[in-house]
Image (cartoon, rainbow, N blue to C red):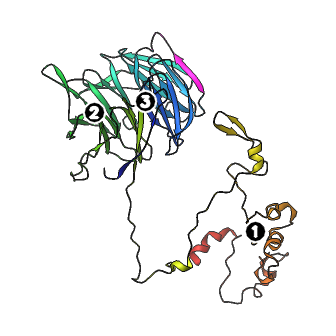
Amino acid sequence: MAGFEYLTTIPSLEADKFSTSAVCFDESQELLWVANASGFVSSYHSLQLLRYTSRYVHTSFVKQLLSINRGILSLSSDELKLVNRGGTIDFTVRDESTLYYMQCMCLNPNYDKVYVSGENNSLTEIDLRSAKVGRQSNTDCSNAVVRYSLKCGQICCGTTNGKVTLHDPSTLQCTNVIDAHSGSISDIDVSDNFLVTCGFSTRHNHLNSDRFLMMYDLRSMRSLNPIQVHFDPTLLKFMPNYTSRLAVVSHTGQFQICEPGVPLTPASLVVQQLESPGYPLTFDISPSAQTFAFGDSEVYNFTLHSNMIMFVISLLSSGGSLLSDWPNDLTEKKDRRLAPIDCKILENMKMNNFIGYAPAPINYKRNQMPYIIRSNNTNEMDENILENKEFEDEQEMLSEYYGEIPKRYHRVAMKYSKLGLEDFNFESYNQTNFAGLETDIPNAYCNSMLQ
């Protein structure tokens, strides 16, 4: 935990009226999506959290955000909408007979289907290709959290009576039931074949938070050793790129990284307090597991923490100084600055809110920039060198800039006759006993090994 540090905090839209209800990192783009209780969904980019898009998506509380390839799924209590990364709505799924009092959802990426549930005592399937409601199955009680296990191919539902029910995605029927807590389920998550839950227990007719995270193996349907934490956990999530590492958050703003099956160390017992007077309502982890986002209740903002662990690389040497260790008086460090934007692009740019649009230059392809050669005498760009169409070949263009290049340094163009290689005089260019390495032949990939 010593490797995480605070980055920034910004207020969400309409922070004086509504709190942040959901946060979600985009899996395809470097964006952070944030929703609040008024139905506003916004996206932010860069570590400074600059606003990218923002619009009203729902007229009520946004329950959950989910990132897919086509955009962001936004769930409210009575509808599901797909918001693309430009901020517009692609489709809306609404059904008064089946979609009501919804609370949570999960994605089945194999079949482009989403399973939604909530306080309506049912589990509903929605097809993302047709944007229509599919099968529906009744459940014994309300579901607070829904997760999909890609490894086991089952839908895991955390219920309000402390049980986790496993459903077959083909029929939505319940196949197994796990008694995790005596009270309600607060949060669950799945990774590989492991299921972890946190919740409440009933003691003296009162609900108290369990300080043990219950862990199960979905292959054998047996309980594993519980994970003890030093605060009351309310939110948890498996960290991407790790099999069993967990991020656990309490309602008081405490934050800890746990890894079951690993011996306890002083670093693993460190608990960090979030810098906020409120309590976190939601949090998410970036796909790289380097950044965390928290949605707060009091000041209606979200906080980012970044993993700043430094890695030490040891170099093997003979004990003396390296050839690259030049003295300071012979070296100079400079930044490679980006080329300025062409004035023609700025003149043709049209502003839409805070985003500028301009037609791409005809001479350049997508994400292509010219190789800029600067003059020796001035800092201005030599336009004659950039206009390659004025010269017949590359040699003439370079000679125009650098002056006349000696003939011995010119690139030799091998011109074959009817006899092929046998008619070419290699001895005038190579007087050694070694064969020359050509880059234009099919076996050129062996040159690096021969050298």
Residue stretch rendered in magenta on the structure: 88-98
Q: Is residue 142 left or right of residue 367?
A: left
Three-letter residue code for mark 2: Thr
Q: Which mark is residue 292?
A: none
Label 1 vs label 2, nearer the camera: 1
Three-letter residue code for mark 3: Ala
Residue 103, position as x, y percentages in the image: 39, 21
The residue pinned by badge 1 equals 378
Q: Which mark is residue 197?
A: 2
Vertical relation: 207 (above or below) 221: above
| Residue 94 in magenta stretch | yes
Q: Nearer the viewer, residue 449 or 356?
A: 356
Three-letter residue code for mark 1: Thr
Label 3 to label 2: alpha-carbon separation: 20 Å
The residue pinned by badge 3 equals 22
Point 67% across, 77% down: residue: 437
Q: Nearer the viewer, residue 186 or 132?
A: 186
The earlier-in-sequence mark between 1 and 2 is 2
On the rendered image, what quadrant is the C terminus found in?
bottom right
Badge 1 vs badge 3, beta-carbon distance below 8 Å: no
Q: Is residue 417 left or right of residue 296?
A: right
Q: Residues within 10 Å of mark 3 (few under 14, many from 20)?
A: many
Residue 31, position as x, y percentages in the image: 52, 40
Vertical relation: 350 (above or below) 361: above
Label 1: element kind: loop
Which residue sits furthest front?
A: 16
The earlier-in-sequence mark between 3 and 2 is 3
Q: Is residue 387 visible?
A: yes
